[in-house]
Amino acid sequence: MARAGDSMPVNDPADLLVCYDIADPRRLARVHRVMRRWGMPLQYSVFYCALTRRERRRLESILRSLIREDRDDVRVYGLRGLDFIQFHGEKPLGGGLEVFGS
């Protein structure tokens, strides 16, 4: 899980998209349980998170301890903000729900 750049201030949360493809069902369930504590599921293996740099590093460390890097794939993408996200088809939050925060 390489970081392209650490330009965000330490205490400012950044919008992140965490996506994973885990080969083993047990590891997949463990990663999913961890991710439910750190973010909001958009799909089973895709989560939205608003994390500070320190929180992001902690999450990445936890994920590294759970996966096999030779078989599994975890990606953390920085987003510019929720105003740049467009949904086509069914919205992941359902009707009438919005995300506030970062």
Image: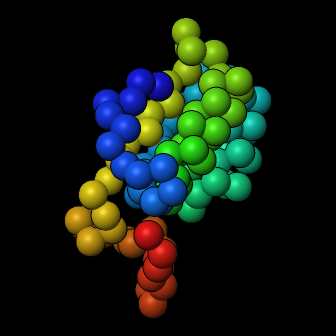
Which quadrant of the figure has residue 26? top right
The x and y percentages for residue 70 are 55, 9
Residue drawn 62% across the image and 40% down it: 59
Say whether residue 87 is visible. Answer: no
The x and y percentages for residue 79 are 32, 53
Which quadrant of the figure has residue 80? bottom left
Q: Which colour scheme is used?
A: rainbow
Which quadrant of the figure has residue 3? top left
Q: Residue furthest top?
A: 70
Residue drawn 45% across the image and 90% down it: 96
Residue closer to the observer: 57 or 72: 57
Residue drawn 31% across the image and 64% down it: 81
Q: In this view, does 13 lie to the left or right of 72?
A: left
Query: On screen, 10 above or below 31?
Result: below
Residue closer to the observer: 13 or 65: 13
Residue drawn 44% across the image and 39% down it: 76
Query: What is the count of numbered marks?
Result: 0
Q: Which residue lies furthest to the bottom in this view?
A: 96
Residue closer to the observer: 1 or 12: 12
Query: On screen, 102 above or below 18?
Result: below
Query: On screen, 85 above or below 62?
Result: below
Say whether residue 5 is visible. Answer: yes
Quadrant of the snapshot with the C terminus: bottom left
Query: On screen, 35 above or below 20?
Result: below
